[in-house]
């Protein structure tokens, strides 16, 4: 009869043997095409610091050609946008919105004109620009390891791949020795696109080195006239189906949204198409000839265009202008708070008298 100790010893030996087999299976089961430079992905914030953002604050269209759904809130609230939350106390949100109303109403006549709203929009847009400059300074120093005031493409590439989970030192060694980097296809495609933008941001004389100002153009092309042209070209290239470097309405609304699987998804797609159609016909197509040129799209994309700001001001007022006086009253802006702040002020009718 086997003793209890012997049985436990045999059971333990069996467990260790199985564990060793599983470890071997794990090693040999790993994909053969994994890069030897790739490390386990970590919570690394460098990627957010050095990768140009898809979402452009205070700009009407994203870099991929999608409309910026938060644009109205961004140019009305500026940095205060995060303070408005559906979960916040409605009374607090009403008071914050009333305080903003007072700031926009510069002549203190208790109503906002298109010119006052235009001035406010330009101020908030400049605020977004200054915030981008501030962040760019931090991000530039993060990718300028030798602090010489210039960043080479190789320096940036090393930092970018490190943010993607590659071993930074090994990548740096391979780049220095001109050795091949084993990079997956998706990452390589992103790198190729970034490289194109990098050289576009490199102002004459082209030296393949970006200064802090040029790096700003690289990360935030919406604030550089030359890079704005490049961004427009990219958008037109993606949407233009007949190669004439112009956009028709059908081309502008044909950007794929995704597979429609149910009625709810269909409604979302329909809303998306409706929004893009309205923006195309009412705003982007300046001469209303059914064709959007690169020049028209560039003017539409320019965040510092004063005419656009005035046009936007008039549109924003029209949304809530119930008495049709072409001004925005405090009660009107409170009632349409969701449009201006993204937050619906609950119990508006019952509580508004408490504030005013």
Image: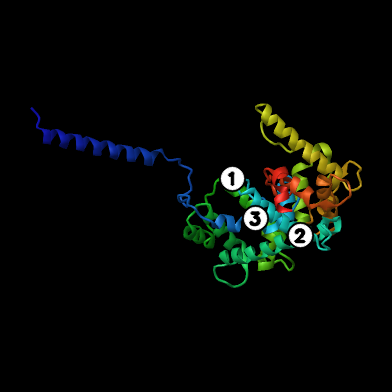
For residue 101, which quarter of the picture? bottom right
Choose mark 3 or mark 2, whichever is in front. Answer: 2
Find residue 98 and report its horizontal and vertical position in percent. Answer: 73, 55
Q: In this view, does 10 lie to the left or right of 217?
A: left
Q: Are marks 1 and 3 in contact (CB under 8 Å)?
A: no
Q: Is residue 120 left or right of residue 16?
A: right
For marks 1 and 3 on the same chain, the one whose residue lies earlier in the sequence: 3
Choose mark 1 or mark 3, whichever is in front. Answer: 3
| 217 vs 265: above or below | below
Q: Mark 3 highlights which residue?
A: 52
Q: Are marks 3 and 2 in contact (CB under 8 Å)?
A: no
Find residue 304 and report its horizontal and vertical position in percent. Answer: 79, 60
Find residue 257 and report its horizontal and vertical position in percent. Answer: 69, 36
Q: Which of 155 and 130 is in front in this view?
A: 130
Q: Which residue is drawn at 33% across and 40% down?
A: 24
For residue 253, which quarter of the picture? top right
Neighbour tally class for label 1: few under 14, some 14-19, many 20 plus, Cα within 10 Å: few
Residue 8 visible at all: yes
Q: Which residue lies furthest to the front in this view?
A: 354
Q: Mark 2 highlights which residue?
A: 102
For marks 3 and 2 on the same chain, the one whose residue lies earlier in the sequence: 3
* Quadrant where the N terminus is found in the figure: top left
Q: Nearer the viewer, residue 183 or 227?
A: 227
Secondary element at image label 2: helix
Mark 1 to mark 3 CA distance (whole Å): 16 Å
Number of on-image labels: 3
Q: Mark 1 highlights which residue?
A: 186
Q: In this view, does 215 lie to the left or right of 311?
A: left
Secondary element at image label 3: loop
Mark 3 to mark 2 CA distance (whole Å): 35 Å
């Amino acid at each position: 009869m086997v003793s209890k100790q012997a049985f436990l010893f045999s059971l333990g030996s069996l467990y260790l043997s199985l564990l060793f087999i599983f470890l071997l299976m794990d090693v040999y089961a790993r994909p053969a095409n994994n890069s030897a430079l790739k490390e386990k992905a970590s919570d690394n914030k460098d990627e957010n610091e050095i990768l140009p953002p898809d979402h452009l604050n205070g700009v009407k269209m994203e870099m991929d050609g999608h409309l910026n759904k938060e644009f109205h809130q961004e140019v009305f609230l500026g940095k205060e946008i995060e303070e408005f939350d559906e979960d916040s106390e409605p009374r607090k949100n009403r008071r914050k919105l009333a305080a903003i109303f007072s700031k926009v109403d510069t002549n203190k006549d208790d109503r906002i004109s298109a010119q006052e709203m235009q001035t406010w929009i330009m101020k908030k847009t400049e605020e977004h620009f200054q915030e981008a400059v501030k962040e760019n300074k931090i991000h530039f120093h993060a990718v300028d390891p030798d602090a010489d005031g210039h960043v080479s493409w190789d320096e940036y590439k090393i930092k970018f791949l490190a943010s993607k989970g590659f071993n930074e030192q090994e990548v740096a060694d391979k780049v220095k020795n001109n050795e091949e980097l084993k990079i997956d296809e998706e990452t390589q495609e992103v790198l190729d696109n970034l490289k194109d933008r990098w050289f576009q941001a490199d102002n004459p004389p082209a030296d393949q080195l970006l200064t802090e100002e040029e790096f700003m153009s690289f990360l935030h092309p919406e604030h550089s006239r030359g890079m704005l042209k490049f961004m427009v070209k990219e958008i037109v290239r993606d949407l233009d189906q007949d190669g004439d470097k112009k956009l028709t309405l059908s081309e502008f609304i044909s950007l794929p949204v995704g597979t429609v699987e149910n009625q709810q998804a269909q409604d979302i797609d329909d809303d998306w198409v409706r929004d893009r159609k309205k923006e195309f016909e009412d705003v982007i197509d300046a001469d209303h000839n059914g064709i959007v040129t690169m020049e028209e799209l560039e003017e539409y994309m320019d965040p510092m265009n004063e005419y656009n700001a005035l046009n936007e001001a008039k549109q924003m007022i029209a949304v809530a202008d119930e008495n049709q006086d072409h001004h925005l009253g405090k009660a009107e802006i409170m009632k349409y708070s969701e449009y201006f702040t993204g937050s619906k002020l609950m119990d508006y009718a019952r509580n508004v008298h408490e504030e005013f």
